Image: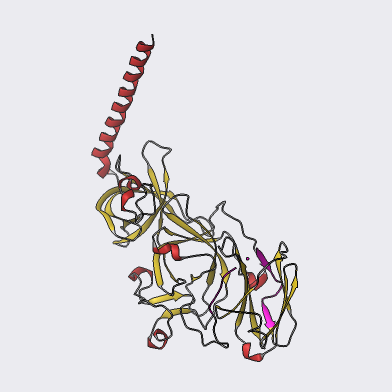
Amino acid sequence: MNDLFKKRMDQIGVSGNHFVDQSNLIVKKTFQNDQNYQCGVLYDWDLNPLDESVEFKFEKHKTYLAEGNEVEYYIHFLPDYNPEFLFKNDYYRPDGKERLGFYIEVFDRTKGEKDLWLIVGKDDRVAMDRYLAYKCNWQLEWIDNSQCWHSITAVVRENIADNIREWETTTAMQGTNIGGKISVIFPTAQHAKTLTFGMRVMITDNELIPRCFEVSDMKDASPLGVTKLYLSRSKYNAHTDYCGVLNNSYLSKLKAVNNIESLPAKLGGDFHCLCDCLDSAGVIESTKPKFKKPTLHCEIDQLIVNGSSALVQTIPSESNVKWHYFVDNIEYTKEELSDYFTIIDKGSGELEVAAINRVMAQYVLKIAIYDEKHSYYSSHELEVKM
């Protein structure tokens, strides 16, 4: 009896496989007849070509709504073409894991030119696997802790629903804290891992009032091969940040130890948006920066010289908090700032700060807390005015 059952099940399995093979054969023969058919280049995480003639269908998944979701597309490859499996050993760390984060070249018929899209997800709930893709719309630039310049072709997304964390919207700093509303998505390339908590990046289209952000959180394990940065607003610092074409007067002030190259023509060219790239004029002899601590809260974002003090608090209150003070993104001790600010640690996670020297006018004092591993990070900026 058992032999009869096994024989029958084997026959069913053979029939099923035969049906799948026949379906795949039909799909392959009719693949190019679809109006969504394209043939382009598939790139790895560092924009090196992996397949210069990959065939795929480019299918709309979601349309754009004003103040809502941005347009999303599916990439539908030929049957049995799974780039995360085919090219898993081309990742810089060949650990056998399958990853997404591939770039793909898509022809825009309305413009008559090709654009880069980023493959960020996979839908395998249907018979033919489909890959979710977003159009690349920003060249992210940053200076790492070794003073090296980096850039990566990325996707800036607004109004993304994600369960990673919801940050509170606040009226402090003129409503500039944004939680879960802006994220940046890019491949988990080797050099991209130099981006860490507290680093600042600039994402703006207004060189007169540039918008800067700090990395508040990140997600890089689901799916593998794709990194998402979650950002909170940070004040633009004219002493250390730059938005525009880098001319000779600014090249001499650059902190980057390597050359800053031109960006892709469609994503900036010679126009750069960089935070913490210029050497500060400084008001105090610089010291080597250190790093350390939960969420900071303060009712105000400005200090008037010889005016009222600001009360900065940790939420929840933290008795063993270690405070860090930055001017022009250079860290100083409380003693080094004693000629410029009155800083009183009141204990239980409360800090009272007042500006006492007009030399500090138009500078920004940043107060930050974090631990040695940067497992959490929070900061608050106070702009000094007369």
Q: Position of residue 51 (x, y in %)?
A: 26, 53
Q: Position of residue 33 (x, y in %)?
A: 26, 43
Reply above or below: 263 against 255.
Answer: above
Give the residue displayed 42% in from the left and 82% down from the top. Answer: 254
- For residue 299: magenta? yes
Q: Quadrant of the C terminus?
A: bottom right
Reply above or below: 67 against 309.
Answer: above
Q: Please give left or right for residue 221 compared with residue 106 in the image.
A: right
Reply above or below: 10 against 195.
Answer: above
Q: Quadrant of the N terminus?
A: top left
Q: Position of residue 250 (x, y in %)?
A: 42, 85
Give the residue displayed 65% in from the left and 70% down from the top. Answer: 322
Q: Nearer the viewer, residue 10 or 340?
A: 340
How many labels, in total?
0
Q: Please give left or right for residue 313 compared with residue 326 in the image.
A: right
Give the residue displayed 27% in from the left and 42% down from the top. Answer: 31
Q: Nearer the viewer, residue 183 or 365?
A: 365
**Residue 331: quadrant of the picture:** bottom right
Task: Considering the whole magenta stretch, tell me its main secondary structure.
Answer: loop
Q: Position of residue 233 (x, y in %)?
A: 57, 69
**Residue 319: quadrant of the picture:** bottom right
Q: Please give left or right for residue 318 compared with residue 215 in the image.
A: right
- Examine the rendering and report whether any part of residue 121 can be seen: yes
The stretch of residues the image draws in magenta is 288-303
- Examine the rendering and report whether any part of residue 170 can be seen: no
Give the residue displayed 33% in from the left and 19% down from the top. Answer: 10
Q: Nearer the viewer, residue 49 or 108?
A: 49
